[in-house]
Image: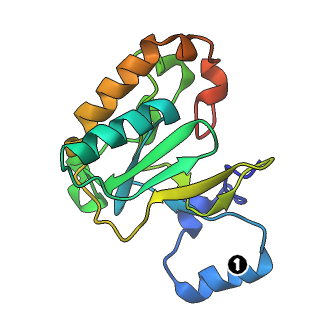
Amino acid sequence: PARHPISFAWQTQSTTDRAQIERWARSQPLANFITATGMIHDVLDVPLTAGRSALERLLAAGIDVGPVAQSGEDRMLFFTATRGTPEDEDEWWPCELDCHPETMDAHPGLRWHCRGSYVLLPPARLPGELDVRWVRGPEHELPDPLTLLETLTDACARYAGSAEQSELDHDSIAWPLSR
């Protein structure tokens, strides 16, 4: 609940039309909004512990991190510029390449939301008292994802080797949805 689009046709219904967004907000006042990735921006989605560590290291190194959100108690979302767009068809890959539970061991906790995926747009409500909220707001410029990737993957590798991670159920943390 609260982490998926209301409509299965979300990819064809996505819009930046202000009037349509206002109509949706009026008709579904409790619904969260998603942002489709892979057109203007991507999102590097990491475990919260790894994300906090990486964010601290990136900021200490003076790297322009861009917008960052915390999703619930377990994920951190780093918003970046996209690496490929529809005009650049040879440059993109579908998000499904690294979002399945069976790939979690090969990609310790890092998911790259690109074309064909989405994330909740802060502020958003999750079941219970959880939410999705900005840690660094959207006023920050979107960085190239490659400037963050090494630090994020290092933090995720440390997280994957930790005792905290070994207790996680990989199927339950694959997101958007495990298949």
- Spot occupied by residue 162 in the image (x, y as percentages of width and height): 47, 13
Say above or below: 41 vs 177. below
Residue 142: name its quadrant: bottom left
In the displayed structure, does residue 47 sit left or right of residue 107? right
Q: Nearer the viewer, residue 114 or 155?
A: 155
In the displayed structure, does residue 104 sit left or right of residue 62? right
In the displayed structure, does residue 114 sit left or right of residue 147? right
Residue 10: name its quadrant: bottom right
Residue corresponding to mark 1: 25
State the residue lying farthest toward the front: 60
- Quarter of the figure that contains the C terminus: top right
Q: Nearer the viewer, residue 57 or 140?
A: 57
**Residue at left 54%, top 68%?**
14
- Spot occupied by residue 121 in the image (x, y as percentages of width and height): 55, 61
> What amino acid is at disc 1?
Ala
**Residue at left 24%, top 62%?**
87
Which coloring applies here? rainbow
Q: Secondary structure at mark 1?
A: helix
- Spot occupied by residue 27 in the image (x, y as percentages of width and height): 78, 79
Residue 165: name its quadrant: top right
- Spot occupied by residue 163 in the image (x, y as percentages of width and height): 53, 10
State the count of labels. Answer: 1
Say above or below: 122 vs 76. below
Q: Residues within 10 Å of mark 1 (few under 14, many from 20)?
A: some
